[in-house]
Image (tube, rainbow, N blue to C red):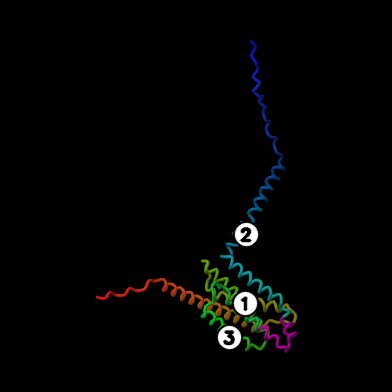
Amino acid sequence: MLATPNLSRRPVVRSRPPAARSAPSVIRSGLLVIRSGYRHSRPLRHLSLMATLFSSTRERRLWGYALVVVVAIYSTLGLARTVVGLLGNTGLDVWLFLFACILILVTVVTQGLRTRPSVAEWGVAVGIAAAYLLVLVRMAIPTERSHLIEYGVVAICIYEALQERTGQGRRVPVPALLTVLLTGLLGVLDECLQILVPGRFFDPVDMLFNVLAGVMAVTASAALAAARRWASARRHRSGTADTLPPPRRPRSQ
């Protein structure tokens, strides 16, 4: 009897070993892998760099505001006297400076403000506005007023950024003094740039006004912060007193 062949078995096909890849293709594949990894790691490195330089998003935003104001000041060095000449004796410059003073006050009040201002905070804000108005009125030269306004805004942004950095646990030695020093250095650079501008000259008196602007802005911001802390502590004490149970009366014998 003849044996029937097993048709269910399939012939085994041996796979050929893969052909060796050429050196250029290997190098090209490696470069693609490196490029894709670098592309995906760039956002992570950017975030780590931002986290190293700045303690929070608010600090980065405040430094950005300060940079924008400084660039605006430096880029308009040749326009200050031109604008003053155009205004002349129209009286419009007084209203413009009053408006700028109000802007400074609003900037000081709103920086770091997360709750509704209390009566004490509004009282300090009115005192700050009165001090700025008195100083601006006593300044006869419009360019001196502009220095007080411009570098006042710069000092506020720098001081609030340093305060935010301190609040996030970073070490900042004496934020108020450091703010005045940075504002003064920016004012010195301003005067040095004026040497290169036609019709402008180096004036040490303007540097003193820049330092004065920094001192006034830091004092105003610190006074408002103190009033804010006092109002917050008072609200906390009143809330704690409301939640406490009433004292027990002694029993009559």
Residue depicted at 59% across the width and 73% down the height: 158
The image shows residue 89 at horizontal and vertical percentages of 72, 89
Q: Give residue 132's quadrant in the image.
A: bottom right
Q: Amino acid at mark 3?
A: Ala
Q: Secondary structure at mark 2?
A: helix
Q: CA distance from mark 2 to mark 3?
A: 45 Å
Instruction: Point out the tag, 1 or 2, that comes first from the N-terminus.
Output: 2
Q: Which residue is denoted by mark 1 in the rendering?
A: 153
| Relative to 197, 175 lies left or right | left
The residue nearer to you, when weighing 235 against 217, is: 235
Q: Which residue is denoted by mark 2 in the rendering?
A: 46
Which residues fall within the magenta stretch?
80-97
Q: Give residue 25's quadrant in the image.
A: top right
The image shows residue 120 at horizontal and vertical percentages of 51, 80
Q: CA distance from mark 1 to mark 3?
A: 17 Å
Q: Amino acid at mark 1?
A: Val
**Considering only vertical position in the picture, is 146 above or below 164?**
below
**Considering only vertical position in the picture, is 183 above or below 61?**
below
Mark 2: few, some, or many residues within 10 Å (few <14, many ≥20)?
Answer: few
Instruction: Specify whether residue 5 is painted magenta.
Output: no
The quadrant of the rendering that contains the N terminus is: top right
The quadrant of the rendering that contains the C terminus is: bottom left
Instruction: Specify whether residue 86 is painted magenta.
Output: yes
Which mark's residue is nearer the viewer, 2 or 3? 3
The image shows residue 31 at horizontal and vertical percentages of 69, 48
Residue depicted at 63% across the width and 75% down the height: 186
